[in-house]
Image (spheres, helix red, strand yellow):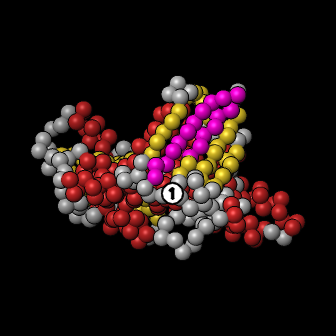
Amino acid sequence: MPGPAAEDLEDLYENAPCGYLSLGRDGRIVKSNQTLSRWLGIAPDALVGKRLRDLLSTAGQIFYETHFAPLLRMQGYFDEVALDLIRADGTPLHVLANAAERRDSEGELLFTRVTVFRATERRRYERELVDATETAQAETRLSKGLLLAEHEAAELREQFIAVLGHDLRNPLAAIDGGTNLLMREPQSEKSQRVIGLIRGSVLRMSGLIDNVMDFARGRLGGGLQLNRSLKPLLPTLAQVVGELRTSYPEREIELHLDAAAEVEADHARLAQMFSNLLANAITHGAADQPVRVDAVLRAGELELSVANAGPPIPPEAMAQLFQPFYRSNPNSRVQGLGLGLYIASQIAQAHGGRIDVTSDATETRFTFRMPQA
């Protein structure tokens, strides 16, 4: 007979304050504990042979198959994934799930462990916070007859930002993770070019998401938040240049600045602004001429400029360059939402600076100026 220690371990597994699942190589449940069975109202024997997706709602099944299952196969684990399990009576059980694969010495999958934590109170708390905020805002607008419009706008804002921050970033992260894994393996020259194209597309898509997220925060509430620090400027700019050289290997980018220069700013935002300006110069500049980047600290001011050769910007377009969703040539094959320069200008303003533009037959130059202590 098992001793007290063995009984304690068995009881710890069966009656733990969380649910346990073990999935076989084929993804079917081979073992579960009593805690999960009590939560679901389904006996452990009845769970054996089912797949994890069989316990999810219809929307959860789609999201699991398109997002989390590929992520698990690619990196071998996922953490704190919000799922809705369906109880025996058809009601949802809100949970957070962690999963990790176990493999043998040759890399063959043995089984997958899944730990499930109830998140009902957390979901209710989050919902109550949102409801409390919406209620407080609604009370201030009730006298103006805007309660219904504000409620609809709040729901739209919540859904819109959730889609951007969650549904778009997750598959993008999976693609980026996949290319990182491929880069660790020997590849042919052709494969390396294809992987480079994929990474370039991921970079552009990530930039688009960042721009739309910032636009949503600025227009729907929240604004741009800055996290200032005093750091060397060269690494911030060099990283952006390196990323864009990967996406545009045929374009020449000249970077001129004092390597010792230090700037007090939000360097992540500064990199985002510079990336938008540099990508704009590469996209619209002459393909056979280099894009020149100059940065200098003088008289208590940072001056960062990006210049490209090519046709000048028409005078009628100059006044609208920094307007959201504006594109000087809507019929152009150049892809984009028309938010890059708008977000760049918002980042400049948040730093107490500005962006000026000059354009003639010789060059087009965007210059960012920001005061320094």
Image height check: is 270 above or below 219? above
Q: Nearer the viewer, residue 59 or 246?
A: 246
Which quadrant would the N terminus be assigned to in this image?
A: top left
Determine the residue located farthest toward the left in the rendered image: 106
Image height check: is 246 above or below 159? above
Where residue 169 sits, quadrant-wise, is bottom left
In the image, which residues are magenta? Answer: 289-306
Which quadrant would the C terminus be assigned to in this image?
A: top right
Residue of label 1: 285
Label 1 sits on a secondary structure element that is loop
* Left or right: residue 5 compared with residue 298: left
Determine the residue located farthest toward the right in the rendered image: 143
Q: Nearer the viewer, residue 162 or 131?
A: 162
Three-letter amino acid code at disc 1?
A: Gly
Residue name at image x 14 percent, y 44 percent: 104
Residue 135 position, x and y percent, is 75, 59
* Left or right: residue 188 compared with residue 172: left
Q: Is residue 217 visible?
A: no
Residue name at image x 41 percent, y 71 percent: 58
Residue 15 position, x and y percent, is 35, 46
Determine the residue located farthest toward the bottom in the rendered image: 331
Q: Is residue 135 visible?
A: yes
Image height check: is 336 above or below 21? below
Q: Nearer the viewer, residue 334 or 58?
A: 334
